[in-house]
Image: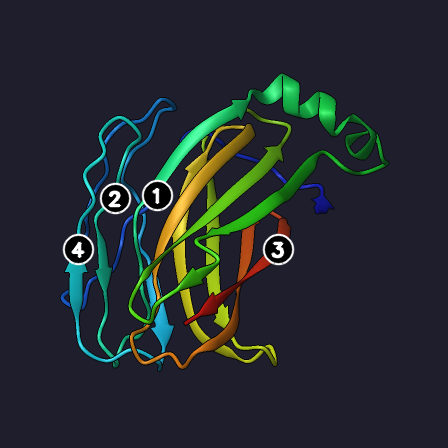
Amino acid sequence: MTLAKTPTRTLCLTLAVALPAGALIGCANTQTREKGAGIGALTGAVVGGAIGYAIDDSAEGVIIGALAGAAIGGVTGYVIGKQLEDRDETAHEYQRELAAPGVDEVLDIKRVTLDPDFVEPGGLLDVNLVHAYVGPVDQEQDFEVELMLVDEGGAILLSQAQTQVYENGTYASTITFEVPAELEPGRYGIDVSMHTGGVTDNASAVFNVL
């Protein structure tokens, strides 16, 4: 969890994916308000070829995913978002941190889980996040989210960056990550970094490739 004092903006969850041709893809509404308004910058050197796929689940909200070629690298999927706590509830939870001198902004990745724990090369992995943000102004706020695929030694094999937008509050969201087909069997990790305004937080979880 990271604390800092900066202006803030907040509102709803969004993500768009950068395809090799540069196309943008929007998303449907969810229980919390969502809109398509970001660009995913994909980097890495594990994956070759180009594969696209889409998931349709309007009840939860979706974003079409695409797998970029080796020149761009990376994988991407869809995001679903649900608000767990509003601004007041979240501010109450972090009242001690916000009471510290000079602190009026808190960002906390509370939990990262991966589903399933064991996945075949080329399979899909859901990266489930619970994250909280409280700032002094309750309006739209851009969040830069980066997923990094790392090996057991901590070396970054692949990274996926994207923009999401949230209100103040606590949210659960899911990013579907396509495991590179070339990945060798073994234990790997997903490192998650989230940044907005002057605050950044990081968290990670591990999974196994069969």
137 and 38: which one is in front?
A: 38
87 lies left or right of 208: right
Mark 4 Cα-neighbour bin, 10 Å: few <14, some 14–19, many ≥20: few
Please give the residue where the numbered disc 4 appears in the rendered image. Answer: 53
Amino acid type assigned to the residue bearing label 3 in the image: Ala
* Residue pointed to by mark 2: 63
Q: Which residue is depicted at the point 43% across and 71% down? A: 209
Point out the tag, 2 or 3, that comes first from the N-terminus.
2
Residue named by callout 3: 203
Is there CB contact under 8 Å for labels 4 and 2? no
Q: Is residue 49 shown left or right of residue 16?
A: left
- Which residue is under mark 1? 79
Whether residue 61 is visible, yes or no, is yes
Mark 2 surroundings within 10 Å by alpha-carbon count, few (fewer than 14), some (14 through 19), many (20 or more) = many
Q: Amino acid at mark 4?
A: Tyr
**Mark seen at residue 50:** none
In the rendered structure, are the residues bearing label 1 and label 2 in contact, judged by CB atoms less than 8 Å apart?
Answer: yes
Q: Residue at x 30, y 75 (%)?
A: 73
Instruction: Tell me the CA gap for discs 4 and 2.
Output: 10 Å
Mark 2 and 3 residues: CB-CB less than 8 Å, in contact?
no
Q: Does residue 13 show up?
A: no
Residue 82 position within the rendered picture, expressed as x and y whole percent measured from the top left: 43, 28
- Please provide percent x and percent y for residue 11: 44, 28
Label 1 to label 2: alpha-carbon separation: 6 Å
Seen at 44% across and 39% down, the residue is 173
Element assignment for label 2: loop
The residue under the point 60% across, 35% down is: 133
